[in-house]
Image: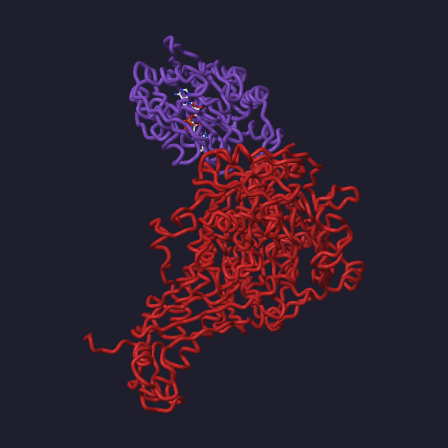
Amino acid sequence: MNDLTPPTREERSAKLKGLGTSRKRVEDARFTQGKGNYVDDIKLPGMLHGDFVRSPYGHARIKSVNIDAAMALPGVIAVLQAKDLEPLSLHWMPTLAGDKQMVLADGKVLFQGQEVAFVVAEDRYIAADAVELVEVEYEELPVVVDPFKALAPDAPVLREDLEAGADGAHGPRRHHNHIFLWEEGDKAATEQVIDSAEVVAEEMICYQRVHPCPLETCGSVASMDKVNGKLTLYGTFQAPHVVRTVASLLSGIEEHNIRVVSPDIGGGFGNKVGVYPGYVCSIVASIVTGRPVKFIEDRMDNLMTTAFARDYWMKGRISATKDGKITALHAHVTADHGAFDACADPTKFPAGFFHICTGSYDIPVAYCGVDGVYTNKAPGGVAYRCSFRVTEAAYFIERMIEVLAMELNMDAAELRRINFIKKDQFPYHSALGWEYDSGDYHTAWDKALEAVDYAGLRKEQAARVEAFKRGETRKLLGIGLCHFTEIVGAGPVKNCDILGMGMFDSCEIRIHPTGSAIARLGTISQGQGHATTFAQILATEIGIPADSITIEEGDTDTAPYGLGTYGSRSTPVAGAATAMAGRKIRAKAQMIAAYLLEVHDDDVEFDVDRFVVKGAPERFKTMAEIAYASYNQAIPGVEPGLEAVSYYDPPNMTYPFGAYVCVMEIDVDTGTHEVRQFYALDDCGTRINPMVIEGQVHGGLTEALAIAMGQEIAYDEMGNVKTGTLMDFFLPTAVETPHYTTDFTETPSPHHPIGAKGVGESPNVGGVPAFSNAVHDAFRAFGLRQSNMPHDHWRIWKIANDLGLHD
Amino acid sequence: MIPAAFEYHRPSDVAGALSLLSTHGDDARVLAGGHSLIPMMKLRMASVEHLVDLQDVAELKGISVADGHVTLGAMVTQHSLIESAELAEAAPIVREAALQIADPQVRYMGTVGGNVANGDPGNDMPGLMQCLDARFTLQGPNGSREVAARAYYEAAYFTARADDEILTQISFAVPVGGYAYEKQKRKVGDYATAACGVVLAKEGALCTSASVAMTNLADVPVWSEAAGAALVGTDCGPEAVKTAVAAAVADIDPAEDNRGPVAFKRHVAGIIIGRAISRAWSRA
Ligand SMILES: Cc1cc2nc3c(=O)[nH]c(=O)nc-3n(C[C@H](O)[C@H](O)[C@H](O)COP(=O)(O)OP(=O)(O)OC[C@H]3O[C@@H](n4cnc5c(N)ncnc54)[C@H](O)[C@@H]3O)c2cc1C
C-alpha cells in the first residue's frame, strides 16, 4: 500500500472516534495520576478557612452562644451566627423545594449536626480548635425521627417558623409537621377496581434513608474582590449556573458580577445539587473579611448534614385477574424529608417523578399520593444516582410485582412478561400521565432470561430448598429479577423548572481555523466522562476527530447557561444540544463547501469528515479545509468564522430500561451472602461509548449493592446519627464487589437527535430491586413477603430467625 | 476530623521513651502505627499533649523464633506478621489472623504491640494472644515485668499496663497441632462481628489440648477455659463441638451495635466458634 492511497470511508470514520466507539476516557490521564484539580486544591492568596459549630442534639432551643473564648484564640478572624447574617437576610435561605432552611441556627436546632456558628480562621487547624471553644447552651426538646409519629396530633412542633394552618409551597398542610400531599392519577377509579378485584396484594415497603457519599465531600471557596465588585465562587456544584442565579438573588450582587466555577468534581450522585449553608457562609465571610474563604466538609459533616436520599415508606396495593393480568396500582408514600424540605426536584414535582411507579407494565388505572413530613433529621431528599425519586418508584413496583407473584402463586418472570407494555404500544401513555418514548421489553427480558438459563436456575433453586429441608445445606439460593423503566432527561421547559429556570441545556461550539474545536456545555461532569463522550457526539456530527475537540464545562463566565448534571439529563438534554449545535455548524460548512467547490449548496452532501459533490466523491472539501476557509477568505453571503450555539428544550423525557438478574447464595446462620452471578442488560437507546457505558453500569451496580446490602443513615430515638463514619456507613470495596456481566439491546429514543437516552443511573435504579429481590426470593419458599433493606448480615439472619429456620 | 495541637517526640530507644513518659505523665502517650490512636485524636475523643513516637526505636522491632518460642517486638507491623516466612512456619495462625485485620493500608502501619496494648475489644490480636497463652513484657521506670495475655485485659481500654509503662514484646510457645482464626465482618476494613481463634492438639483420634478465645464478643477478649476443656478427650465430632460452642457462648457478653442485636451476635458467635474448631481439627 502506498501513502497516496486515499483512506477508505471506514478508515476516515474510525479516525473520528465518534458514536459507538469505545474511546478511552480523556479525563483519566489526569485523574489516575493525581493531577485532577478539585475544590480543595484551590489555594488563593490570603485565603481563610471556615468550620462549623454543629448541634449535638436532634432538637433543642438555643439559650445562648458565647464566642469570646473562640475569638480570643490567635488566628481567629470571625465567628458568624444567625444574628450576623440576619441584616443581610441570609440567616435563612430558600430551598429548591419551595421551603426555606436555616443557614445558621436561628433560635433552635432541628437535627443533629445542624450548623450553629461559622468560625473563620487563618488555617484549618485554628478553625477546628476555635469550634471547640464556642460555648452553646442548649435546652433539649422532644425529638421525633419517625415520620408516622411526626404526624401524631400531639407530636412536637418542629417548624415554629411556619404559620399554623397556612398552605405550603405545594398546597394545604394538614398538620404542623406535614409539608404537602401530592397526588397523581384517578384515586376513585383505582380503588374501585382494587376493591372488586380477583386478587389483591398489599404491602408496606420501606426504602431506607441512604446517602450518596461521593468520594469528594462538598466544599466551596468564595472570593469577593472588593475593588472590582466581583465574587468568584469555586465549589462542588452539579449545577453551577443555577448556583450563580441563586447566589445573585440571595446576595443582591448582580449576576454578571458573579462567576461560579465547578472544578473537577469527585463524584456527585445528587449530593452536590443543592445549596448548603457552607457555601452561603463562605460567601458572607469573604464579603465581610474581604479575603477568600474556603469551606470543605469532612466525611462526618458530609454524611450527617448534606443531602441524604430516599427515606420513603411506600404502601402499595396491586390488583390482578386470577391469571395474572394486572388491573390497578395504588401507592401511598409517607416521605420523610427531615427538618427542612430541601428536596432537589423540578419545582412542580415535590415527589419527583415517583409517578413512574407503574414501571414497565401496562396498568390500566393507577393512583399515587405522597405525604411529605418534617422530622428531626438532616434535610435533603436528593436523587442519589437516579432521576428524581425514580429509584424509589422502581423499587416499589419491582417489589410489588414479587409480592403479587406470591399472592398468585406464579413465577415472577412470567408475571412480568404478561404485563409488559408491548413494543407496538409505544409511544405509551401511562395511567399516571407519562408518555413513554420507546421500548422493547419482551425482547430484552427474553434475552436476559436465556442468558442466565432462568429455567435451569429455578430447578437448581427447588433442589436446594429440598436439600435445605433435609438438613444437607444451610445455604439458600435467591434469584433476583428486575425489569425497570426509568424516566430521565428533565426536562421539557413547559413543566420542568428549578426555581423558575427551565430545564433546557446548552452547547456552544467554536471551530478553530486549523480544524480543531472547543465545545462548552451547561452541564458539569463529576466522573461521567463528558469530555470523552460529548466530543464523540460532535465528531460524528461535524466530522472533526474527537481527539481534536476540547469539551469544557463548569465555568459560568465561559459556558452557556445550563441546568447542570443530575437525573441522567446530560446526554438527553445537553447531548441533544451538542448534536443540534453541531448541525448548525454543518449547515454553515455546507454553504462554504459548496462555494469552494463551485456548486450549488444542494449539490454537496456530508460524508463522514467532508462534504462531497453528489455523484463525484473525488471532489470534496474536508471539514479542516472548510474551517480554514471560514477564517481566511471572504465568502459571499456568509459571515466569517465557524461557531454555533444551541439551547435545547427537550420535547419529552427519555425512558431507558433494562433487565437484570442477580443470583445470590445466602447463609441462613450468619446472614452473609455471596453474589454468584449478576447479569445486567441495559437499553439506553443509541450507545455513544460502550466502554463508558460499561463503566457507568459497573459503578451504578456497586452503589446498588451498597444500598441493598448495607447502606443506611440510621438515627436513634434521640436523633443521634448512628452511621456517621465509613466504619458504619457501608461503602463496598473491590473485595465486596461481585463480577458483573453486561449486555444490551438498542432501542433509540425517537425524539432525541441521536436517539440516546442516558445510562449513568440505570444500574442503580435497576440494581437495588435486583439485589433485594434476590434476598427475598431465597426465602420465598418459606413464606417471606417483605423485609426492608438494608439486607445486612443481622437483618438477613433475622429473616431466617423469624421464619423459624434456626430452630 | 482535625486533632488538637500536640508536641511530637521521636526517641531512639526505650529508655528515652520511658523518660519522656515520666516527664510528661498523663499528658503523654506513645504512638505506634497510629491507626487506633490518630483516629481517636482526630475525633477529639483522645487528647494527647505529648505524642511519643516509637517508630525509631529499633529494639522494639523484629520477629524471632528460637527454642520453641516466638518473640515479637511491639513495633512489628501487622504487615510484617503476614510477610514473615519464619512466623508462618512456626505459628501460621498469626498470619491467618493478621490477614483478617482491616485492610492492607492499615496493616502496613498498625503494629502488633499497638494492637494488643490498646485494649480495644474489637482488635483481633488480644484474643489471638489469649488463645496462644502469650506473655507481654512491660517496661517501666522501675524495670520490666511480664503479664499473661489472659490476665492483661480489665475492661474496654483498661489494661494491666501502667501509664508509665511501654509494652515492649510479646512471646508465646510455638503452638502445636491444628489452628484456625475465623472472623465474620461486614466488609474489608471492619472489626469483627464475631471472631474466634482455636489451637488444638490431637493424638490418635482424640484431642489432647485445646484453647479457644474470642474477639469483640465482650468488652474484653474472652478466653474460654470451659470450651477448651470440653474438647479435650473427644474426637471433636459434632456433639463435642456443640458442647464446646455452648461453653464458649456461655462465656461471652456481646453488646448491641450497628453490627446487630445481642441475639444475633450470640448466634453468629456460635457458628464462628464451631467453624473455627472444625477447621482447626481438620488441620490437627
Ligand atoms: C479502618 C480501620 C480498621 C481496623 N480494623 C481492625 C481489625 O479488623 N482488627 C484489628 O485488630 N484492628 C483493626 N484496626 C486497628 C489497627 O489494627 C491498629 O493499627 C491497631 O489497633 C493499633 O495499632 P497501632 O500500632 O496503630 O497503635 P496506635 O494507634 O499507635 O496506638 C494504639 C494505642 O496503644 C498504645 N500503644 C501503642 N503501642 C504501645 C506500646 N508498645 N506500649 C504501650 N502502649 C502502646 C497507644 O498509646 C495508643 O493508646 C483497624 C484500624 C482502622 C483504622
Quadrant (top left, top right, bottom left, bottom right) of the N terminus of chain A: bottom left
Query: Residue A533 location, x and y as percent?
Result: 42, 64
Residue A807 lies left or right of residue B27; in this view the side is right
Quadrant for the C terminus of chain A, please: top right
Nearer to the camera, A471 or A419? A419
Q: How is the image coloured?
A: by chain
**Residue B203 showing in the rendered view:** no
Relative to the observer, which residue lies in front, A620 or B80? A620
Which residue is at the front of the view, A462 or A432? A432
Chain A hue? red
Asked if B125 appears above or below A367 in the picture, the reply is above
Residue A715 point in image, percent of width and height: 63, 39
Q: Which quadrant of the frame does ligand 1 lie within?
A: top left
Which x, y percent locates residue A7? 27, 76
Q: Which quadrant holds residue A789?
A: top right
Colour chain B appears in: purple
x 69%, y 38%: residue: A143
Q: How many marks?
A: 0
Residue appearing at x 69%, y 58% in the figure: A169
Q: Is residue A48 left or right of residue A367?
A: left
Residue at the left extreme of this rendering: A2
